[in-house]
Each structure stands twice: as C-alpha cells, then as structure tokens.
Image (tube, grey):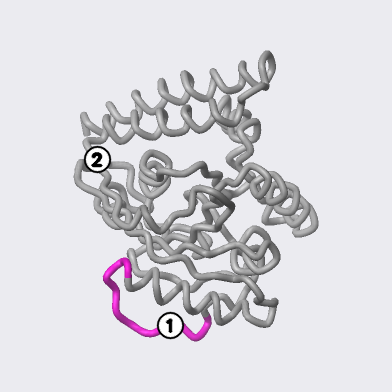
Amino acid sequence: MIRTLWVYLVGSLATLWYAGAMVVRSHVWRRGLYRACDRAARGWARAILWASGVRVRVEGAENLRTDGAQILVANHESWFDVFALAAALPVRYRFVAKKELEGIPVFGRAWTSCGHVSVDRGNREAAVEAMEQAWREIREERFTMILFPEGTRSPDGTLQPFKKGAFVLAIQGQVPLVPAAVVGGRRVMAKGEKRIRPGPMLIRIGKPIPTEGTTLRDRNRLLQECWREVARLKGEGGTFPAEGGAAASPGGGAEVGR
C-alpha cells in the first residue's frame, strides 16, 4: 500500500510538471512543440515506472520504422501498458484514446496540444473527423500511431476480439501495421485494481504487415493476421475468435484505460 501511495504521489507530481510545461509551451512557444512533447511523454512515463519499481525490456525494436508513419496495434491489459510503451518505444508516437481523457485537469490540455488523438465514441461523425485530421498530421510528422484494437483493457488478460478501425486506417493510409504484445502489465496492476506491484514488463514487437495495394476488402484478413501475431507474441495459443472485429468503431475502438 505504501508503494501504491508513493506511485500516485509521484504520478501526480510528474503529470503537473511535464503536462504543465507542455500547456505553457503550447501558449508561448510552439516552435519545436512536438519534439518537446516527445521528451515530456517519455519523462512522465519513466517517472511513474521508476516509482512503481517496474523495469521494461523491448524485443524486436528493429521491426519499427523510423522514417515513416506506421500503426502499432497492441494488446491492452493494464494502465501500465501505456506507461511501458510511452517510456520504451524508440520512435516518435501518438496514442489514440477516449475523449474523456481531455477532461483531466492539465493532462487533458497537454494531451490535445501534443497531438494525441481523442475519439468521442458517442459521436461517430466527430470521431471520424478527428481521426482523419490527426492522421494527416501523423503522416506528415512520420509518427507511429498506437492503438489498442481490443477497445478496452482485458479483464482476465486473454486477448479479446479486435475492432476494425485500426485496419481501415492502415489501408486508407497504405502504411504498415506493426503487431506488438505488452506482457506483465496485468501483474503490476490489473483492471479494476488500485494496488500497484513492482515487477518486470516486456514489449515484443513483431514484423510489420504491409498494406500496400490492399483495399477495404482486405480489412478482415489484416485484422485476423494481426490478432494471431499479437497472440503469438503474447505467448497465447487458441483460435481466432469468430466474432473478432465484428463491430467497427471510430478510431479502431482504441482506448487507453477504461
């Protein structure tokens, strides 16, 4: 319990420091803002991981391109998946998450100022418009877009069906899909728990799946291929769920913590 309180204290201070700095920067000096946001996001996430006693190791980083846009699709079991990816990925990235994060004081303003994508799941038209605008910026800046196509954190750690949005985006942009598995986050902090436990985490990054020449008719094939690869990277067996991806949602159903 002492560690958990310590993490919440450090996390709050880190959020005020890093997010507050980006809010101020966005008002007084926008030149180089995105680069400053990259450093701030990594500093914020690393502070939380340090306080939590969590060590993150990355395998397969060579599979990430550094000279162009791509979409990274990962499983989602814990808030710590976000911190691990934010701290350890060796590329410039932006997350896609639910619009409710914009309402968090200081953090929400920094989130939007730094170009992360907010999706209003109750307003499909607004969500699609936000994704299209963000996608243009991401391609121009050569960011990696990070989505959690399960749509929410898995309650038991098993890989849930994927939604289609991430794969539609990849086809529209003709950019590669990069499957990734984040392992160990649920042991640190499972969905519905408040207690934080120290321990190792591992990010396994698979080989990119090309989308050049694909059309929307290929979206289910790409979805299934990504699902199977993420499951393999996680070390899971099992069969692709028949209902996987049956319901599309704006922004791929991607969501950071629910």
Q: In the visual, does 190 lie left or right of 75?
A: left
Q: Taken as a whole, is the magenta stretch helix, strand or loop?
A: loop
Q: Dot 1 lies on which element?
A: loop
The residue at the point 26 percent across, 35 percent down is: 52
Name of the residue lying farthest toward the top: 28
What numbered label is drawn on residue 240? 1
Q: Residue at x 70, y 53 (%)?
A: 131
Residue 69 rendering spot, x and y as whole percentages: 59, 52
Residues tagged 2 and 1 counted as in contact (Cβ below 8 A): no
Residue 241 left/right relative to 142 = left
Q: Is residue 179 magenta?
A: no
Residue 182 appears in which quarter of the rendering?
bottom left
Residue name at image x 49 percent, y 61 percent: 73
> Disc number at residue 54?
2
Q: Earlier in the sequence, mark 2 or mark 1?
A: 2
Q: Residues within 10 Å of mark 1 (few under 14, many from 20)?
A: some
Please tell me whether residue 242 belongs to the stretch shown in magenta: yes
**Residue nearest the observer in this picture, 170 or 3:** 170
Tell me the kind of residue under disc 1: Phe
Binning the other alpha carbons within 10 Å of mark 2 as few (below 14), some (14 to 19) or many (20 upward) gives many
In the displayed structure, 249 sits above or below 31; it is below
User: Where in the figure is residue 133, as x and y percent of width and height?
Assistant: 75, 48
Kindly state the secondary structure of the residue where label 2 is placed: strand
Which portion, as a residue range, is magenta? 233-243
Q: CA distance from mark 2 to mark 1?
A: 31 Å
